[in-house]
């Protein structure tokens, strides 16, 4: 068996990531199996099952065969080069943040494999619950992505733009999202194939420029653009003030209340954290999921 060992930038706690992913009731791409993280990634343009296991301060990567760009793909996906030292210094210096996030220090900033995955998955998540979105993503990916069977388990790669553009209508209807958003999913895939959306060029943009470019797509507003930027790049420059879960979580953890708060109140609550407000919001949601959602059976 060929192993690749990666050294994440400390602090990095893969066990926290596994604990978070165990809350997914319908995992579509990232699967926790016997203490490992399994996912099918495109490496050397081929779908390959990659298995990640924490070993001390290293990550053991098990692709079924050596792959030239496996390290690059895995490093991006797991955010092993992210430097959160300034954010953690803020957490340590702030009484409120220290009380909330001290047990989350080292939580990896998981990313999507690429910008296309972020776009498709986040569009599915528009205006539906987190659990419902998981089911919709799982059904679409299983209907259109390439399958790999390993040790009796079937896992699927994220569908390529070509696979999604040419998918039968039934595959999109299986998501049970609105017809308008089903059409947007196919349109995104078609625009990638035509070159109207240049994933390589957009992937080189700054977070702010990418956000602006995304807003030019009909059907994408602040929430979708901000989440796509975060998922695809691992950067969190925006606060999701119109996210209903975040509104409830900020009210609970920062204000001691119950239920949702208005978006402006959320912005005002996190404003003192300046450039780190987006990361504070992200870690707030992570804490909310870990505490409010049980481990999936």
Image: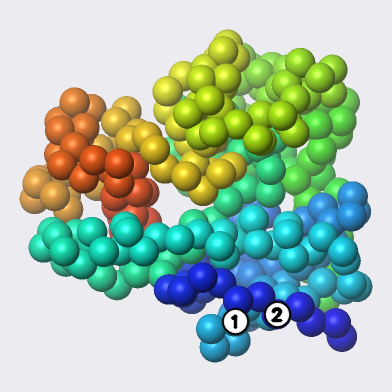
Mark 1 vs 2: CB contact within 8 A: yes
Q: Is residue 297 visible?
A: no
Give x and y (percent) for residue 271. Answer: 19, 37
Give SS at disc 2: strand
The quarter holding residue 37 reads bottom right
Please indicate, yes or no, whether residue 129 appears anywhere in the rendered image.
yes
**Which residue is located at x 46 percent, y 19 percent?**
221
Q: Position of residue 192 (x, y in %)?
A: 78, 24
Q: Nearer the viewer, residue 28 or 296?
A: 28
- In the image, residue 226 sits, relative to residue 62, either above or below, namely above
In this figure, which residue is indicated by the disc labeled 1?
58
In the displayed structure, 34 sits above or below 153; it is below
Residue 285: mark: none
> Does label 1 or label 2 sit earlier along the sequence?
2
Q: Residue 122 location in percent, x, y?
A: 55, 34
Q: Residues within 10 Å of mark 1 (few under 14, many from 20)?
A: some
List the residue tagged with mark 2: 5
Left or right: where does residue 238 sit relative to residue 296? left
């Amino acid at each position: 068996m060929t192993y690749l060992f990666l050294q994440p930038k400390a602090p990095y706690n893969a066990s926290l990531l596994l604990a978070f992913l165990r809350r997914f009731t319908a995992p579509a791409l990232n699967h926790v199996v016997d203490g490992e993280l399994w996912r099918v990634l495109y490496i050397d343009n081929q779908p390959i099952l990659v298995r990640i296991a924490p070993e001390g301060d290293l990550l053991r990567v098990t692709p079924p065969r050596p792959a030239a760009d496996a390290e690059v793909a895995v490093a991006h996906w797991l955010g092993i080069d992210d430097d959160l030292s300034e954010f953690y210094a803020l957490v340590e210096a702030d009484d409120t943040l220290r009380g909330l996030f001290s047990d989350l220090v080292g939580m990896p900033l998981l990313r999507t494999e690429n910008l296309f995955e972020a776009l498709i998955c986040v569009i599915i998540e528009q205006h539906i619950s987190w659990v419902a979105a998981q089911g919709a993503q799982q059904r679409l990916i299983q209907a259109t992505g390439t399958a790999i069977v390993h040790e009796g388990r079937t896992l699927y790669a994220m569908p390529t733009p070509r696979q999604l553009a040419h998918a039968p209508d039934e595959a999109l209807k299986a998501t049970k999202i609105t017809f308008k958003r089903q059409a947007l999913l196919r349109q995104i895939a078609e625009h990638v194939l035509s070159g109207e959306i240049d994933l390589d060029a957009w992937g080189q943009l700054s977070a702010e420029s990418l956000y602006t470019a995304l807003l030019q797509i009909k059907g994408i507003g602040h929430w979708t653009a901000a989440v796509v930027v975060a998922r695809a790049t691992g950067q969190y420059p925006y606060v999701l003030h119109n996210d209903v879960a975040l509104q409830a979580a900020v009210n609970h953890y920062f204000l001691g209340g119950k239920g949702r708060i208005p978006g402006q109140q959320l912005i005002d609550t996190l404003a003192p954290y300046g450039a780190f407000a987006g990361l504070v919001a992200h870690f707030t949601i992570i804490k909310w999921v870990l505490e409010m959602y049980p481990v999936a059976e």
